[in-house]
Amino acid sequence: MSQSLYNRFDHPLHLELGDSPLLRKGLLFLHLAGICAWVITPLPWVWRLSAATVLVFQFRRLHRLHVRPAAVHAARGLRWAPETGWQIKTTAGWRQADLCHPCYVTARLVAARFRIGRFRRVTAIVVSDRTGADNFRRLRVRLLQCAHGR
């Protein structure tokens, strides 16, 4: 690997996390499958209705938190620089963050938890359709390098 290609991943990384249609479709499919499973379960109708209601509210919560970041504690952006390390954007603005291990990194999905302050943790779920291909690749490489102590 050439030295210039390796150095490309040491440049500052800046991601603004917007709406994710792919994540929305996945969450909708999983929650609808769960509701269908509860509906056909041979339990009293009150329990089935309660479980379906919980799944609807959970979908709404996850949608506001990860698909279209509108919740107060939603991750709206990620930034990494060699001098400052990780920063995460919430409604309060950009805050210094520490990466918590383990991170989930695949070719189309990244899930990483960050600690802000002493007790607060924020999860950033980044699907490949949320950002450009080059920035997504650089994020995956940076998270894998951080996980291995580099």
Image (tube, rainbow, N blue to C red):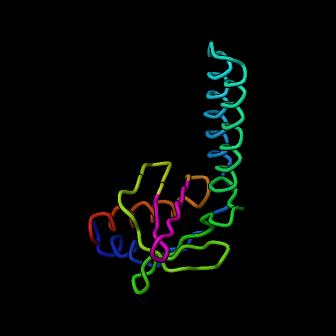
Q: Is residue 50 left or right of residue 127?
A: right
Furthest-top residue in view? 42
Q: Is residue 121 magenta?
A: yes
Q: Position of residue 134 (x, y in %)?
A: 51, 63
- Of the pair 117 and 10, the residue shown nearer to us: 117
Which quadrant of the figure has residue 148?
bottom left
Q: Which quarter of the rendered picture does the N terminus lie within?
A: bottom left
The residue positioned 41% from the left and 53% from the top of the image is 105
Q: Is residue 4 left or right of residue 115?
A: left
Kindly report the secondary structure that dominates the magenta region of the rendered protein.
strand
Image position of 83 with respect to 86: above or below:
below
Q: Position of residue 65 (x, y in %)?
A: 64, 56
Image position of 12 with respect to 75: above or below:
below
Q: Which quarter of the rendered picture does the C terminus lie within?
A: bottom left
The residue positioned 69% from the left and 62% from the top of the image is 71
Q: Is residue 70 magenta?
A: no
Q: Is residue 71 left or right of residue 107?
A: right
The residue positioned 45% from the left and 75% from the top of the image is 118
Q: Which residues are magenta?
A: 112-126
Which quadrant of the figure has residue 70?
bottom right
- Of the pair 76 and 8, the residue shown nearer to us: 76
Q: Position of residue 30 (x, y in %)?
A: 61, 33
